[in-house]
Amino acid sequence: MLPSCREIAEQASENIDKPLTGIRWLKMKLHLFICVNCRRYKEQINLSSKVVKSFEQSEEPNKQLQANITACYEELHCKHKEKQD
Amino acid sequence: MEKAAVLTEQQILSRLLEGDQVLFQQIFKQYYGAMQSVAYAIAGPVIADEVVQEAWVSALKALPKFEGRSTLKSWLIRIVANEAKTRRRKENRSVSLENMQESWATDPRFAENSHWSNPSSQWHGDTPEALLSAEELKDCIEKNLQKLPENQLAALRLRDSAGLSMDELCNILEVSPSNVRVLLHRARDKVLKVIDHFQITGEC
């Protein structure tokens, strides 16, 4: 028996992280073939995941944080160098 | 200026140990988003940057001993995740991110036979850029993400924002693979519903 739309909705998200294989993959494909709503849902859940991903790429670090960490890098590098010398 | 992207991990490590500041700045910026997402997901927005700073201090101290058994990115992510968990405990927030209680069996989009009764609409735009050309939608999604249960938001940020593997999610969130799948699906489904509502009404 083919999975229900609710099951397909869950599998659409699972498929993003680990593509379905074997009989589960085949049943999903067959369901998608006959169900326009699930085809659309699968595309939209992929797109929703990509939208969240695009948020991270636009994050700019806080200037003060960057300055603090750079200062720490310089300081630790100097100490490390002193040890080596 | 040589870009970090053209260097091998080993070359990056050597250059960082030699004190290559320009490269360090590039690496810091490159991994900031992922590290911040992990810190945010586990320790919350208020102290996320502090956690990132503490993680970098720990990482820089340990850098000479880093043997390159994992990639630099996953090593940094592990450090920031551990730092965030420690801070979470100190701030007296519950450490357990497990709470799988809510059910979506009553989702009104599905009929009793578990097939669609109210499916999503056709969207105008099939890329994140096209959808987010409406600035209000991004704000709307961000606002709604804050309303997600903590464990779902953490899973979504760790996986889709920070790009961590499913195994890493299980370790950090201390839940089973099937629970991670449920958390991710519910969180993504919420984003989908927010976008769909916006597409239909033009409002958040």
Image (spheres, rainbow, N blue to C red):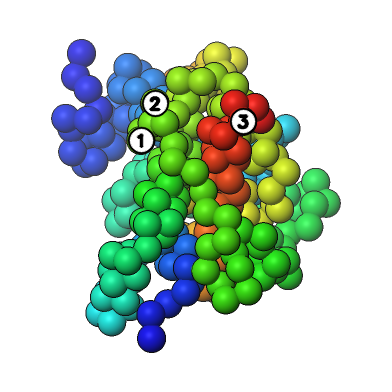
Q: Residue at point 72% right, 32% down?
A: B46
Q: Name the amino acid type tagged 2.
A: Ala
Q: Chain of mark 2?
A: B
Q: Name the amino acid type tagged 1.
A: Asp
Vertical arrangement, residue A54 with respect to residue B173, above or below:
above
Q: Residue at point 62% right, 54% down?
A: B152
- Image quarter (top left, top right, bottom left or bottom right) of the C terminus of chain B: top right
Residue B180 in sight: no
Residue B170 % position (x, y): 52, 65
Q: Which residue is mark 3?
A: B201
Q: Point out the tag, 3 or 1, that comes first from the N-terminus.
A: 1
Q: Residue at point 32% right, 32% down?
A: B17
What secondary structure is found at the residue carrying circle 1? loop
Residue B158 % position (x, y): 51, 49
Q: Is residue B41 left or right of residue A55?
A: right
Identify the residue at the far bottom of this view: A1
Q: Which mark is residue B130?
A: 2
Q: CA distance from mark 2 to mark 3?
A: 17 Å
Vertical arrangement, residue B113 with respect to residue B196, above or below:
below
Q: Name the amino acid type tagged 3.
A: Thr
Q: CA distance from mark 3 to mark 1?
A: 18 Å
Q: Which mark is residue A73?
A: none
Q: Which residue is mark 1?
A: B126
Disc 3 residue crowd, few under 14, some 14–19, many 20+, Cα 10 Å: few
What secondary structure is found at the residue carrying circle 2? helix
Q: Chain of mark 1?
A: B
